[in-house]
Each structure stands twice: as C-alpha cells, then as structure tokens.
Image (spheres, grey):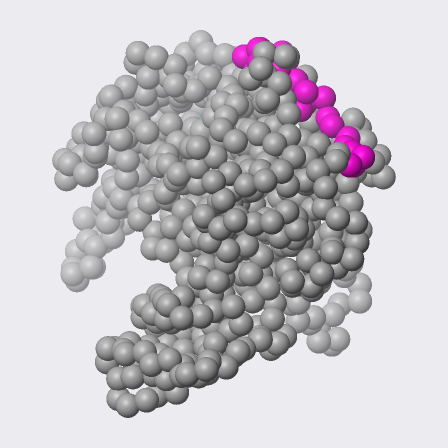
Amino acid sequence: MVGRILEAASNATIPPKIMGAQMAARNSLSPLPYSSSPALALVLMGRIRILSDQVANQIAAGEVVDRPASVVKELLENSLDAGAKRVRVEVEAGGRRLIRITDDGHGMNRDDALLAFERHATSKLRTADDLLSISTLGFRGEALPSIASVARVTLETATGEDPAGTRIEIAGGKILHVDDAALSRGTTVAVADLFFNTPARRKFLRAESTELAHVTALVTHYALVHPEMHFELLSATHTIVSAPPVARTAERIYQIFGKDTLAQLLPVAAETPLAHAGLPAPPPWKVDPDEPVRDPGTLRLSGFYSKPELQKLNRNSIYIFVNKRLIRDRLLLHAITEAYRNVIPPTSFPVVLLFLEMPPEEVDVNVHPAKTEVRFRQQSLIHDFVRDSLRTALVRARPAAAFLAALDASPAASPSLMPPAMSPLPGSPDSEPLLEPDSDPAEFAAARANAAPFQLTPRLPSPVPGKLPFTAQSLNPGSWGDPKAWGEAAAALFQPLSLPPAGDCSPQPGDLAGLNPAAETAQVEAEQAAANLNHLGSLRPLGQLRESFILATGDDGLWIIDQHVAHERVLFEKILRDRQVEKVQRQRLLMPMLVELKPWQMIVFAHIAEELDLNGFEVEPFGPQTLAVKSAPVGLEGAALERVLAEVIEQSSSDSDKTKQNEELAVLRTRIAASIACHSAIKINTPLDPVRMEWLLLELAKTSHPTSCPHGRPIALLYSWKEIQRAFHRI
Ligand code: ADP
Ligand code: MG
C-alpha cells in the first residue's frame, strides 16, 4: 500500500531523505545531511549552524506541548483526523507518568508510522495552496516528533490491510525498536514520562489534579463536538468520562454535564449566506468568464446558550468550535458577552456552546502552533452574526427563571481547558431593538378607569402554546434517571416532525421569515423548551407580598415579580429608546441643585457632559469644583438625582478616551440609563394598587428582556403549575 504521509519539506531545496525500510536502521531522527557532514562544516566555518532535528523538535515541542493536556489534544486530533469512531484516553498521575490514547481509525503502515515521527511529515497537506482550505484538525506535521523528543513514546498501529501491524519505541527523539506486532486496525500512542529529558519544563507542571482537570476539560470539549463518537477517559483508579455514541448534542450534554445543566440551556441555530459578506467584488477585467462562479457558501451557527439565571464567574464555560475545531477567540467571546449585556451582570458569564461552520477558506487556522487560535477573513461579519443570533434567541425565548433554580443563580466557577487569564473585553454599540412606544402609568390608569373596573374574577384562559412530550416527561420525577426515557424525550424535543404547526405557536414579535428550517426549529424549540415570559401581559396580579413583590397567576402557574427591578427594566429600555431618538423628557428644577465635585471628578464630568445633557441633565459649572444642575430627566429628584450623577461619574472614571469611541459611548449610554432607571424605579416597600401592578406587568411584557434587570438580577420567578402539583403530591 502506498503511504499517506509526505514530508512537506522534501522538495528541491533539501535532498530527499532515505525512505522506507532503510529508515528503521537509523537510530536517530534524520539529522540534515549537510549539517552533520564534516566537509561541509569546514567550508561553512561561520557562526551559524543548522540545528539538529532533535533540538529543532524540542524547540517546536516548547510551542506545541506544554502540559499533558496539550499532548492529549494533539493525539486526540490525530485520532479524529484518522476517522476514529471510538477513542479511549488513559492517564496516570495527571498524564505526567502516562498518557495512552487508543483509536479505531485508519492506522498507518510501517513506512508511514516511521515517517510520522519526522518533522514536517504529514498526510494532510501537500502544497501551500492546501493551507487555504484545511479540513483536518492537524496539518503541521509537528506533533508526533515534538512529543517524541520530550517523552518516551510507544506507537502501535495497524491498517487492517497489511499482514502485520507496527510497534515503534522512541525515547527523547531516538528510535529504540521497530517491530512487527499482531494488532487490530487502529492506533495506540502511549506517552510516558513527559519531559523526562527537559527538567526545566517538568518544573512548570502543576499538581496532578490540575493537570487531570485540564485533560478532562479537553476530552469533554471534543466529546461535545462529536456526539456520534464513543469517548472514554480513564485514570488509574476510575472512569472520568464515558460517553457512548448518541444522536444529538443535547443528549451528549446530558451525558457529560447532567440534567441540571441541560435544563438551563436553550438551543440556538441560525445561518446566513456569505454572499452578502461585503467583500469587494473583483474588478470586471479580473473576472475570468470561463471560471465557474464559486459559491461563497454559508455561515452556520448552532449550539446552546444559558438562561440568564445560570451565571459563571469566568469564561471557562464558553466553548467555541469553528469547523469542529476547539478554539479560543477574543472576537467571539466579545460577541457572546455583548449578546448578554444588560441581561446578566457585567461580572458574570454565561454558559455557551457555540458551533460555527463555514467554508474552510473563510478561516485561517495556521495562526498558532497549537492551532487554538484562528483568523477569520470577515471578522466583523462573524462577530455581529454571533452577537445578533444569540441576542435574538434570548429575546425570543425570554426564559423564565424557575423558582428553585433562581436560588442557585449566583455565579459559580467551573473547571475548563480555557485559560482564565483573559482580560475583560470592552463593550460595543448596543443593538436594543426598538419596540412599541410605552405608556405612562397615569394615562393607563385613566384609560382603565373609563373601561371596566379592575376585578379579581377569573378571565377566560388564553390558549396554551403546544407542549412537546419532552416537557411532560421531564417533569416526571423518575424519568431523568432512565437513559431510555431520556433518549425518547430528547428525540421528541429535537425532532422537527413532532412540532406543532406554526399556527399553534404563541405569537412572537417579528416573524420567522428568512430563517432556514434548522433555525426555525431551534427557535420553536427555544420558545417551547421552557416556560417563558411572553404571557406576562396576560397575568392577573393578585396582590403584593410585603409591598415589594407582585404575586400574579397565569396559565402556567404562580408568578412572583420583583416590582423594583421590573420597573427598572421598563424604564431602562424606555430611556435608551428616548435617547436614541433624542426625545428625552427633562424637567426644570425649581432651584438649581449644587453638587460639589473633587478635581478628578470634574475631569470625568467634562468628558461625559455632552452625553449627560442629551439624557436630560442640564448642568453648568458653578465655580471651580461645583456644578449647578438646572434640569433633570423626568422622574429623578432630590437625593436620587445626586446619586445618579455621582454614580455615573464614578463608573466613568476608568474609561480611556483614546480608542473605541463608539463602544464607549454606547457603554456610557447604558450606564446612564441603568443608573437613572435604578434610582427612579418604584422602590420595594411601596404599596401598589391593582391598576399599577397590571400596568407594570404589561409594560414589562413589552420589553425585550423581561427576564433580568440591567444589572442582571432576575425579575420574575415562576412556580410552575407542575411544580405546585408535585409539591402537593397530586402528580
Ligand atoms: P499532523 O497531524 O499535523 O499531520 P502529526 O505529527 O500529528 O502531524 O502526525 C503526523 C502524521 O501521522 C499524520 O499526518 C497522520 O498521517 C499520521 N498519524 C498520526 N496519528 C495517527 C493516528 N492516530 N491514526 C492514523 N494516522 C496517524
Ligand atoms: Mg496531528
């Protein structure tokens, strides 16, 4: 059989190396012929030497292999590239003593197995042009020689077609043995004593448990992106991951993270043709009429995102895959943070599993030796698409916080592969959709007074949106533990055929036109997978709890609404809207209010004065350290007014005035809006009459994010009818 692997460098400039069986005779890995020739060395006599392959490999290892998890990453990627369906990872002592990866992929014949340890030897790339459209995870031909230069490696591999398999032992880059071995198809690579010959590197390894956590995170990530494969991770003492093949990502999430996490996630899917990508068309004289027009392809997004109540302390629970490659990317992290802006607190992070698919030409993966970073050809298109798809999904789904889940809503840490040391990214212009204009509580009350009086008689129930079997089954206490029941429930949830016809769904703001079937499916799933806040406007307020929380009933159960944060959300969105169309209402103060500032505060004030003015604050300097406030936004008075000014100035003090002017302006606007909203919203411990309560619920229903206040606190909790029935042992 002809081997797959070619040496990328074996072209005219470097003499081809001895191939095949002869190679086994060499016990050291291919020193370049002229660097070891004494005659040449004499001629060359200068200072510069070509490094031996062993040294070059160790240098490459510095970039590619820095801890057990990176060895696992490279070997796992090789197994995936080899078309494996089943991969087993075994580690001892956090991977320091042993990492063994066994796959059932296509394996290698003896020549290839030897060549695989040569630098720049790869079967995945032939010409430089191939670099432009890489569809495999590996392509640099560096991993195996790098790993073999810093550890003791045993490779066992068989193609299933050759009479015998091959077993190769290498330590510190030196081939020790090459033997035939009776093996079934597939490859096992065992890496023992990592960094045994580079003590400096070994010192950087962390505690066994830390290294194991990194390995676990890595295997988890790849298991998530390949639900159709069988993954196992075993330590010397126990099984850490065991994930047999399943049909869908949701089932894999269930296998790995359990039902609680899955219950807090919602599916998202969207796509956009890359044709409108805004790349300049080539000039007509450069267009070859004979060349077929290339379809620019499609950008697809799918995955899962967390409800606002699930919050994490760091970004470690954001998993990003581009063309099934796990990556780290500031641009996409930023897009995700943007989507959640003013939905969760700025210091918290969501859980997001994002799978992006795009034509390989759209993304350069050859940016970083460890291949964890990529460069997109159309950065801002991808950024905005991710931000907008997630935000639209959040706005549409309006997930309600379940009563009990909200108790655990404080941010929690979780281990992951992603290095936590990434500085927070700045915000960027907000894209709050404009909704219908809202009303004034007084007007509303007047209108109500003319209409039927408020009463507590039950109304006719509004139609209940179609429920999927999943909902019913998931609420059955015993069913979660039963994988078969789960399988069926999950299949029902993610089976487009079982969806009710569109007409049965509750009306949504906007329509689904222009979305592809997958996106549509995900939208409907998102809307139905969880109780949502779309019916807020039809809730019946019963009264208040301690004059602070509104109790209301709906078809889905009992709702508890925090009156302060609900009003805060309503005002926040109204202020932003009014500001956008420059229709902020201001009121003149009877007497100008004098505010004393410190010198640094005066500097910050000067920087933001114009935006404050556009938000209704008419403020003039009154002496070197004093401001006179003459007008203020309607609804903001006295101490609250002073507090808003102090707060906004304080929060704006760390802004730099150099870059990202637009982003900062948007952040400043939301900051001002959030502060005004907070200080002029109805307080807790305030009695509300039924009309006001009803007004508040209606206005809240109109907001784009009725789920959480601008600071990320939940607004409404649902004690669902099912939960109530279950609590009373009626089901
Ligand atoms: P790259 O993956 O960048 O090509 P590597 O050094 O990781 O470079 O691997 C070199 C070559 O060895 C690969 O191109 C592939 O042909 C072969 N190889 C490595 N691991 C496996 C495996 N598990 N199964 C089959 N072939 C493999
Ligand atoms: Mg590789």
State the residue in front, 587 or 20: 587
Q: How many marks?
A: 0
Q: Is residue 500 above or below residue 687?
A: above
The percent position of residue 353, horizontal first and vertical second, equals 52, 39
The percent position of residue 558, horizontal first and vertical second, equals 61, 32
Relative placement, left or right, of 315 versus 4 is left
Q: Quadrant of the C terminus?
A: top right
Q: Is residue 103 above or below residue 370?
A: above
Magenta span:
459-486
Relative placement, left or right, of 66 versus 143 is left
Determine if residue 18 is in view: no
Kindly indicate the quadrant of the structure image that contains residue 45.
Answer: bottom left
Q: Is residue 170 above or below residue 518?
A: above
State the residue in front, 209 or 722: 722
Residue at image coords 48%, 62%: 680
State the residue in front, 246 or 714: 714
Residue at image coords 78%, 57%: 450
The percent position of residue 10, horizontal first and vertical second, equals 43, 46
The percent position of residue 622, horizontal first and vertical second, equals 32, 89
Residue at image coords 69%, 63%: 443
> Farthest bottom residue?
623
On whether residue 201 falls in the magenta region, the answer is no
Relative placement, left or right, of 520 versus 168 is right
On whether residue 469 falls in the magenta region, the answer is yes
Residue at image coords 62%, 52%: 692
Q: Is residue 223 above or below residue 593?
A: above
State the residue in front, 211 or 414: 414
Kindly indicate the quadrant of the structure image that contains residue 463.
Answer: top right
Q: Quadrant of the N terminus?
A: top right
